[in-house]
Image (cartoon, rainbow, N blue to C red):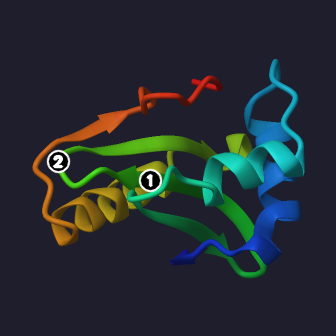
């Protein structure tokens, strides 16, 4: 598995991953673009994807207001559970939070994120 920045070119693969990972939620590319790439002004952000070969098997999107960092959205391939994908992405999130200088990393409660 390798981890790299998630880009807008990866949205189709990320949307398909969400369809598999979240059986009861309908996620469109437009919605995912908003949650991953459109952050409030003044907030730092990052998105990372985990890849096995050419297949996206997980991703995480984060943002920070300088005091707190949030994991806004994350998904992992259900067929590849228990292989360390989510743990690796959490490690990326922790590393990013440290890099931007925050000591608090919260999960899924970013203010204004109606999805979570």
Question: Which of the two labelled residues, at mark 2 and mark 1, occupies the earlier sequence position?
Answer: 1
Horizontal side, residue 27 vs residue 3: left or right: right
Alpha carbon distance from label 2 to label 1: 13 Å
In percent of width and height, residue 102 lies at 15, 55
Q: For the point 55% across and 75% down, which residue is it? A: 1
Q: Residue 62 carries which label?
A: 1
Q: Is mark 1 on a helix, strand or loop?
A: strand
Mark 2 vs mark 1: give the one in front: 2
Q: Residue 114 carries which label?
A: none
Residue 52, x across and y down, in percent: 66, 74
Q: Quadrant of residue 108?
A: top left
Would residue 102 appear left or right of 8 to someone viewing this image? left
| Residue 81 in view of the camera | no
Q: Nearer the viewer, residue 16 or 33?
A: 33
Q: Can residue 6 be seen in this view?
A: yes
Residue at position x 30%, y 60% from top? 91
Q: Quadrant of the C terminus?
A: top right
Q: Nearer the viewer, residue 59 or 103?
A: 103
Expressed as whole percent of the image width and height from the top left, the position of residue 72 reads 49, 41
- In this rendering, the answer to whether 86 lies above or below 51 is above
Residue at image position (65%, 46%) is: 35
Q: In this view, does 16 lie above or below 3?
A: above
Secondary structure category for the residue under label 2: loop
Q: Residue furthest front?
A: 41
15 relative position to 41: left or right: right
The percent coordinates of residue 66 (x first, y second) are 21, 55
Q: Name the residue under label 2.
A: 67
Q: Callout 2: 10 Å neighbours few (<14), some, many (20+)?
A: few
Side of 110 where 18 appears, left or right: right
Circles 2 and 1: CB distance less than 8 Å? no
Q: Tag 1: Cα neighbours inside 10 Å, few (<14), some, or many (≥20)?
A: many
Residue at position x 77%, y 42% in the image: 18
């Amino acid at each position: 598995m390798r981890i790299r920045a998630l880009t807008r070119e990866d949205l189709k693969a990320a949307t398909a991953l969400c369809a598999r990972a979240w059986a009861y939620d309908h996620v469109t590319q437009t919605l995912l673009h908003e949650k991953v790439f459109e952050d409030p002004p003044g907030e730092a952000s990052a998105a990372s994807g985990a890849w096995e070969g050419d297949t996206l098997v997980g991703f995480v999107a984060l943002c920070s207001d300088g005091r707190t960092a949030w994991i806004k959205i994350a998904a992992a391939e259900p067929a590849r559970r228990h292989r360390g994908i989510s743990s690796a992405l959490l490690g990326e999130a922790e590393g990013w939070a440290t890099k931007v200088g925050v000591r608090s990393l919260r999960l899924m409660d970013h203010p204004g994120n109606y999805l979570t």
